[in-house]
């Protein structure tokens, strides 16, 4: 009997949403009918979302890509000899040679889309658990120093240095400490956390375990939004397997050191991504922001010292430990070290995940990777960093994407979400939408956000209807000042960024002359 040919069909949510499960079924059925033995592997996504479902065939030359595959294409693909890597209108050659993928710098996403997400053998074969094995032989202070030296900053939005946060937790004595992974991923147009959890769950588990060793925490929680059922199922299965294999539990690989973790499911409020609301939610309460201080690093979950980190921050720790702080720090620019998985979404032809070192520009991402708008019309505005990020006009698309350069133009890199709009967009409508989003998602704890956002919607509405436009514009700037300075957390405090960037960069959409663009920007 012939040897089975390995065929990869992603089980990632983005692939499943466009029919990957049907493709997998049709593929297996066709192979059975033809008496062709195949080994079907459900991998994560390569992040080339316009090609999903992207099927890969393992050939002697390497993995060949075909996509987007519809179940109806399958008989024709077999006829063309795809199992031998032969040509077909849906063929893209070797996956690794597709320019979108080839030109990336995948450190955090090194294994995503390549391995079977639940196979510990696959994980180990590609460097998995090398970092933890190193950490098991290190003192907690040395692990913290390695992460600090790497320059890693929080990938959830605020970009706080990860090593410094860990140092605070390590130095705070307590009977119990916790590692909490923020997998709420509420930002518009973002999906890197989900892709990582679905495609390489052990990277997150390993990163959290290293964090536990570093700060002497023995228990962890992954707080995942309920809209991510596949990620939740993959994580649950991976945790069980890691535990069975001795990578979690009271005696990790016979070291005498212990760490274990659980998955918790959030109910879907944007504010539950804010770390203190998340902790309230984890404790079984309503997601309401806590005043700081105390920092969660001092008094977090159940009042104990707690590391709260984003999925990508934690999943990047293993490569830092395995290859050294210097290796990671060599990527990037200025104070933004390493790589960021950018996520291209909105009106873009080639949406997907692009992991690159800090310093790439928006123009490169939009055109060299994204291939321009999906509609074919000129791109006009791009929102970077989620719903609290600024809208950037073309004049700012050449600024290097790093935390400081973006802050200098009143924008933020945040979690790396990039949402593109073509020239049909009405930026005054987008400004109103930003205020409305804040009004809907406000936790209600402080007045500038709770009341201010609702009044803000009304004021923008009046501006759009040309009711006392100049007075209302003054009022809007005043209101934004109050929200910026007086809000308890960044939901109210940063909503002025999208609102004022729309007004300042696209005044003509608010009924103002284009030349009247104000130079006032959010501080
Ligand atoms: C309104 C709001 C929503 C947030 N949502 C998320 C989120 O979905 N995921 C996340 O990792 N961080 C989110 N953050 C940032 C967290 O508060 C926190 O800074 C982060 O989890 C810390 O991890 P990091 O240092 O690894 O980035 C949000 C912050 C605010 C103010
Ligand atoms: S800014 Fe908004 S979300 Fe944040 S604490 Fe105040 S009311 Fe709650």
Image: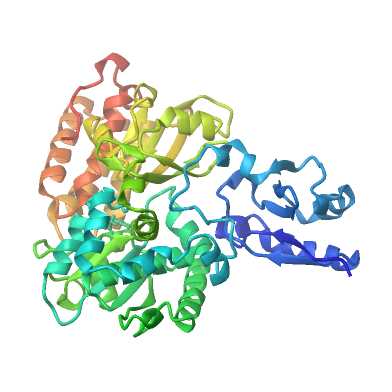
Quadrant of the rendered image containing residue 89: top right
Q: How many numbered discs? A: 0
Q: Residue at x 37, y 62 (%)?
A: 184
Residue 363: x %, y % from top left: 44, 27
Quadrant in which the C terminus is drawn? top left
Coordinates of residue 444 in the picture (x, y in percent): 20, 60
Side of 276 where 246 appears, left or right: right
Residue 361: percent from left, percent from top: 40, 30
Q: In the drawing, does residue 155 fall left or right of residue 47?
A: left
Judged from this view, the residue extending furthest toward the front is: 137
Please indicate whether residue 48 sits to the left or right of residue 389 in the image.
right
Is residue 303 placed above or below 145 in the rendered structure? below
User: Which quarter of the picture shows residue 142?
Assistant: bottom left
The image quarter containing residue 522 is top left
Q: Is residue 435 visible?
A: yes
Ligand 2 sits in which quadrant?
bottom left
Q: Nearer the viewer, residue 339 or 274?
A: 339
Report the residue at 74% width, 67% height from top. Answer: 39
Farthest residue, direction top: 515
Image quarter hosting the N terminus: bottom right
Residue at 86 percent across and 68 percent down: it is 32
For residue 228, say whether it is visible.
Answer: no
């Amino acid at each position: 009997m012939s040897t089975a040919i390995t065929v990869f069909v992603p089980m990632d949510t983005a692939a499943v949403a466009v029919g990957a499960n049907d493709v997998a079924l049709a593929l297996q059925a066709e192979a059975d009918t033809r008496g062709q033995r195949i080994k079907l592997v459900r991998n994560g996504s390569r992040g080339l979302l316009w090609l999903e479902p992207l099927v890969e065939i393992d050939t002697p030359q390497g993995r060949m890509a075909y996509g987007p595959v519809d179940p109806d294409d399958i008989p024709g693909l077999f006829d063309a000899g795809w199992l031998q890597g032969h040509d077909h209108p849906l063929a893209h050659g070797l996956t690794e040679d597709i320019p979108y993928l080839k030109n990336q710098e995948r450190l955090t996403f090194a294994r995503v889309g390549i391995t079977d997400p639940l196979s510990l053998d696959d994980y180990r074969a590609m460097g998995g658990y090398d970092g933890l094995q190193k950490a098991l032989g290190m003192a907690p202070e040395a692990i913290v120093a390695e992460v600090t030296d790497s320059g890693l900053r929080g990938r959830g939005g605020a970009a706080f240095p990860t090593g410094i946060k860990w140092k605070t937790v390590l130095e705070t004595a307590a009977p119990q400490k916790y590692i909490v992974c923020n997998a709420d991923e509420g930002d518009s147009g973002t999906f890197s956390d989900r892709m990582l959890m679905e495609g390489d769950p052990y990277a997150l588990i390993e990163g959290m375990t290293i964090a536990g060793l570093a700060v002497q925490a023995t228990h962890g929680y992954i707080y995942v939004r309920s809209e991510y059922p596949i990620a939740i199922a993959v994580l649950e299965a991976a945790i069980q397997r890691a535990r069975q294999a001795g990578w979690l539990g009271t005696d990790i690989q016979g070291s005498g050191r212990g760490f274990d973790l659980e998955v918790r499911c959030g109910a879907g409020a944007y504010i539950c991504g804010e770390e203190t609301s998340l902790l309230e939610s984890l404790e079984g309460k309503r997601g309401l922001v806590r005043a700081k201080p105390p920092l969660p690093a001092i008094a977090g979950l159940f009042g104990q010292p707690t590391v709260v980190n984003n999925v990508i921050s934690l999943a990047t720790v293993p490569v830092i430990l395995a290859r050294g702080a210097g290796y990671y720090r060599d990527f990037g620019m200025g104070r933004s070290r390493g790589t960021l998985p950018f996520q291209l979404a909105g009106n873009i032809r080639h949406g997907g995940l692009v992991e690159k070192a800090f310093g790439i520009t928006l123009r490169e991402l939009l055109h060299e990777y994204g291939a321009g708008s999906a509609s074919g019309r000129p791109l006009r505005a791009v929102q970077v960093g989620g719903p609290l990020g600024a809208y950037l006009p073309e004049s700012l698309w050449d600024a290097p994407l790093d935390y400081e350069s973006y802050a200098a133009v009143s924008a933020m890199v945040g979690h790396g979400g990039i949402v593109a709009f073509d020239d049909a967009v009405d930026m005054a409508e987008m400004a109103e939408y930003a205020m409305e989003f804040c009004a809907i998602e406000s936790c209600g704890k402080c007045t500038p956000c709770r009341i201010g956002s609702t009044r803000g919607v009304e004021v923008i509405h009046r501006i759009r209807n040309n009711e006392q436009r100049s007075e209302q514009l003054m009022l809007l700037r005043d209101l934004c000042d109050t929200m910026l300075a007086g809000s308890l957390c960044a939901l109210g405090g940063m909503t002025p960024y999208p609102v004022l960037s729309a007004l300042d960069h696209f005044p003509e959409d608010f009924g103002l002359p284009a030349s009247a663009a104000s130079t006032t920007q959010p501080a």
